[in-house]
Structures are given as C-alpha cells and as structure tokens.
Image (spheres, rainbow, N blue to C red):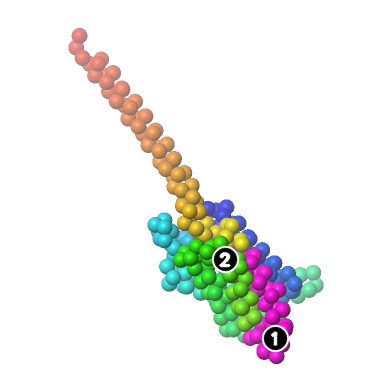
Amino acid sequence: MILLATLLIVSTALAGAFAGILFPQTMLLRGALFGGILGAVLLVLACWSRQRLDAGKGPSLARLIGVAAGGGLVAGLFLLLPAPATSGTAITLHPPVEVGWLATILLAMGYSLAFHLVYALRWRAPLVGRTLPLLLAVVGMVVAAIRHLLVNGFGDPESTLFFALVTGVPFGIAWGTAVAWFDPAFSISRWRRVRKGGVTAKNAESAKRGQGSDESDKSDESDGRRRAVGDTPA
C-alpha cells in the first residue's frame, strides 16, 4: 500500500510537470505540484471509503465531490505561493497573466472536480476504466481551453487551441495513465489484493502469537499431568 501510494504521488506529479514542459518558467513547477495534489486526493478518497471498497462498492458521489473540491482548494492555495528564483530565472507558481486569487482557486477546483468525476465513472461503466487516459485528455483539453480564455480573453482562438492541445491533453493522458497503474483503489480486484496483503500480515502475526500461546498451554498441561502422576500413591 505504501509503495503504491508513493508511486502514485510521484507519477502524478511527473505527469503534471510533463504537461508544463513547454512552459518551464511558469508551468513546470505548477504542473508538478498540481498533479501530485490531485493524486493525493485519490489516496484520501480510498482511505475514507475503505469500508465501501471492502464491500465491493465504489466511493459515494457526495464524498468524492467533497474530497475533490477540497483537493482543488488546497492546490489553488499552493498555486498562489511564489517560488524562489532558480539559476537567475524567475520560476513562479502564478499564472502567466494574473487572474486574481479567487479565479486561480476556482480554476483549480474545477480542474480537480472534472478529473475526479470522470475517474469515478469507471465504477459504473467498466469501459471508462480502460479508456480513462483518453477521456481525461478530452477533459484536460476543455478545461485548459477555458482557463486560457479566462486568462487571455477570446481574441485569439488559435492560441487557445494550441495551449489546450499542448498542456491539457498531455496532462490528461499522463495523469490518467499514472492513476491506472498505481492507484490502489483503481479497481476492486486491486484494492482487495492490496488489502489482503495487509490483512494477511496481521493474521500471520496473530497466528504466531496464538501458536505461542497454544504451545505454552500444552506445556502447562503436560507439567500438570506429570505432577498428577507423581502425586498418585503407589
């Protein structure tokens, strides 16, 4: 579980960085931070919904929306923080054109909600699980286009399309692939394998303690029998 969780955070952060590779000064660090936080949302959701997952059910929609919105809020707040200059070049977490703190937070929450709602569809439609990276590529393109329009206006549709294709699409594909590979709760079967490993280890320890107790009881019983035989009059 710990290994998968670590791989999920690292891979989703790398997915975010990959999406911003063409804009390293303004989007590389922001993308990595944003992708990693969205990956952490899945871990929080899985831990909070472990009883439903153990029963073979997906997380409730209300819980998913709450966790996704909260994760987007946290991501938006982090995106408002300035980053230190590196190698003489200013690397910032702010958008290339300042849109205000409220717009930044709302955009982050919208991105998180859109991605996690599509992610949740796989519990109701198995085909979604097999095509998640492609679906998230479409969602990422739409959300990136909306973000670009809000930041730069509606006067340059070609620029908006280019930005959406080179940021939203790569992010959706890379993030969706990372989730499909490393999310502990991506499927019920994977969740049961992960949980079975943890339960088996606990059971083995309990059995070991129980075996030691049984051996102690048997030893006490044998000692009791020997004392009884020794006390029997000839």
Residue 21 position, x and y percent, is: 73, 69
Q: Which numbered disc, 1 or 2, marks the residue that appears first in the sequence?
A: 2
Rendered residue at 71%/75% (across/down):
26
Rendered residue at 36%/34% (across/down):
213
Name the amino acid, label 1. Pro
Does 51 sit above or below residue 76? Answer: above
Q: Is 28 on the left or on the right of 183, as rendered? A: right
Residue furthest toward the bottom? 155
- The reply to whether callout 1 and callout 2 are in contact (CB within 8 Å) is no
Mark 1 to mark 2 CA distance (whole Å): 27 Å
Q: Which numbered disc covers residue 126? A: none
Q: Is residue 163 magenta?
A: yes
Residue 139 position, x and y percent, is: 59, 74
Q: Is 51 on the left or on the right of 100, as rendered? A: left
Crowdedness of circle 1 by 10 Å Cα count: few (<14), some, many (20+)?
few
Quadrant location of residue 51? bottom left
Res 83 visible: no
Residue furthest toward the left? 233
Say what secondary structure mark 2 lies in.
helix
Magenta span covers which residues? 148-176
Does 97 sit above or below residue 193? Answer: below
Residue 7 position, x and y percent, is: 60, 56
Quadrant location of residue 147? bottom right
Q: Which residue is disc 1 drawn over?
A: 157
Residue furthest toward the top? 234
* Dominant secondary-structure state across the stretch colored magenta: helix
Does 101 sit above or below residue 189? Answer: below
> Which quarter shows the C terminus?
top left
Rendered residue at 62%/82% (across/down):
146
Q: Which residue is disc 2 drawn over?
A: 132
